[in-house]
Image: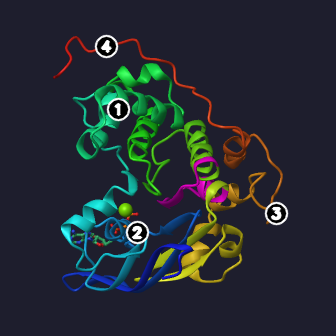
Amino acid sequence: MDAENVIELRQVSTRFGAHVVHDGIDLTVRRGEIFALIGGSGSGKSTLLREMILLHEPNSGSIRVLGVELADISAADALALRLRWGVMFQHGGLFGALTVTENIGLPLREHTDQTDRQIDQIAAAKLAMAGLRPEVGAQYPAELSGGMLKRASLARALALEPELLFLDEPTAGLDPESAGEVDQLVRTLRDQFGLCIVMISHDLDLLWQTADRVAVLADGKVQGVGAMAELAAMDHPAIRKFFDGPRGRAAASSPDVTKWNPGEPTRSNPGFRRAASGLPIPPPPLEIPVLRRPAWKPK
Ligand SMILES: Nc1ncnc2c1ncn2[C@@H]1O[C@H](COP(=O)(O)OP(=O)(O)OP(=O)(O)O)[C@@H](O)[C@H]1O
Ligand SMILES: [Mg+2]
């Protein structure tokens, strides 16, 4: 395996019963890049991500992550590997009975022998890294907005200082402004902290703003891999689908994104506000603290 490659998939095939989801997938994610996986619903994106993080085993083929072959991996090696990546699940996956600080501290309590004080300090640093105000640490997930939840879940994914970050639909369900902040956050994590990021997204703005390379999954195979501008020039019908709809055209016409067909930014162009939300300044802590507090605090 090339040391520059963080993930290598070779001839990965997956089926559920007679349903073939992946039919010989080859993919390479390089060190330091923001890599995105796109494709229609049911094309097997989440399944592929689950295979990369040891939550599902393909029927055949090889997956190497951070230099380790996942097939027949021992329990000890699997644990060691899991500590080297962070995952932000689509719906946050935070424990509702724990505060944000307790949620972020959980992996540290489980996997390190740091003191409570050290863990709280690390949790505070990760909150800041994810662009949240310190007060948010004392809040419960139910008290947070969608954008804050995503950030809190990201803070937890960062707790163990991962080398590799997996994001499943990081902007799904967010308003354009919050989504724009996530774009910025993703870039900051890579640019300032050197993280390699693998994400699944349908969000064309996010893809244009952040992804170095994008793989298009369709009919069990990778139909194309490249920068968004390269994909936008490809003829394959599965790829054209993403670029030829009105949303695809609007996202592609955002300024700051690419020299390819930049178009005129206008207020009515939904891509404009996302792009205008600003690069490359670090994400501002925009959350308004919620003053509500639960009457009881679970132990
Ligand atoms: N555990 C499972 N058992 C049976 N079929 C499954 C299972 N997991 C996934 N599938 C099937 O595999 C296919 C790919 O699913 P997957 O969730 O990977 O798609 P996806 O590309 O992430 O779609 P979406 O964009 O809707 O999230 C689907 O047809 C799904 O029904
Ligand atoms: Mg999915």
Above or below: residue 243 compared with residue 103:
below
Numbered badge on residue 259? 3
Residue at the spot of label 4: 293
The residue located at (46%, 32%) in the rendering is 127
Residue at the spot of label 1: 119
Q: Which x, y percent locates residue 107?
A: 29, 43
Amino acid type indicated by mark 2: Lys
Q: Are marks 1 and 2 in contact (CB under 8 Å)?
A: no
Q: Is mark 2 within 8 Å of ligand 1?
A: yes
Q: Residue placed farthest to the left in the image?
A: 299
> Which is nearer the N-term, disc 1 or disc 3?
1
- Residue 48 on the magenta span: no
Residue at the spot of label 2: 45
Local SS, label 2: helix
* Disc 3/disc 4 C-alpha distance (Å): 48 Å
Quarter occupied by residue 153: top left
